[in-house]
Image (cartoon, helix red, strand yellow):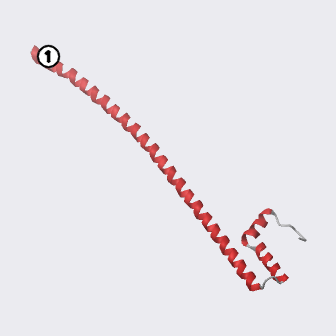
Amino acid sequence: MVGAQPTDTVRNILSREGVYMKKHLLGGVAKGAFDEATAEARFNAWKENKQNGLAALKAKEDEAKKAEAKARLEAEKKVNEEIAKKVAEKKAAEAAAKAEAEAAANAEETPAAEEAPAEA
């Protein structure tokens, strides 16, 4: 090649868009290996195949992202359930302690109430 050389980024873009493939096929036309219609058909077939491959890759990546998000959601639900259980146990323990304290207070008041009429 004569002149400026494309950078890696530019070369990747040109390759992905099919510029290099088109140049390659037109070189074959110039040499007489096949006609321009055949070159165009080969280019279109290559481009379609490339797009299908990229679409399949994108679909696979999207599916992987969905699966990862679902797994994260399930893990978060599990953690939230554990936290909810701990909170419920703590509230139940507090309620039991409160009920026990009230029962003890009622038990102390009841004998005092029974003794008072006996004195009278």
Q: Position of residue 49 (x, y in %)?
A: 66, 72
Q: Amino acid at mark 1?
A: Glu
Q: Is residue 3 above or below residue 44?
A: above
Q: Residue at x 10, y 18 (%)?
A: 117
Give 32 or 36, whichever is nearer the viewer: 32
In the orientation shown, which residue stands out farthest toward the right?
2
From the image, which quarter does the C terminus lie in?
top left
From the image, which quarter does the N terminus lie in?
bottom right
Q: Position of residue 76 (x, y in %)?
A: 48, 47
Q: Residue at x 40, y 41 (%)?
A: 84
How many marks are shown on the rendered structure? 1
State left or right for residue 23 relative to residue 112.
right
Q: Position of residue 77 (x, y in %)?
A: 45, 47
Q: Residue at x 70, y 74 (%)?
A: 46
Q: Is residue 66 above or below residue 43?
A: above
**Residue beneath disc 1:** 115
Give 51 or 107, whichever is nearer the viewer: 51
The crowd level at tag 1 (other Cα within 10 Å; few <14, some 14-19, many 20+) is few
Q: Position of residue 87 (x, y in %)?
A: 40, 38
Image quadrant where residue 20 sits: bottom right
State left or right for residue 72 relative to residue 23.
left
Image quadrant where residue 92 sits: top left
In the orientation shown, which residue stands out farthest toward the top?
119
Image quadrant where residue 108 sits: top left
Give 114 or 52, whichever is nearer the viewer: 52
Q: Is residue 10 above or below residue 26?
A: above
Secondary structure under the numbered disc 1 in the rendered image: helix
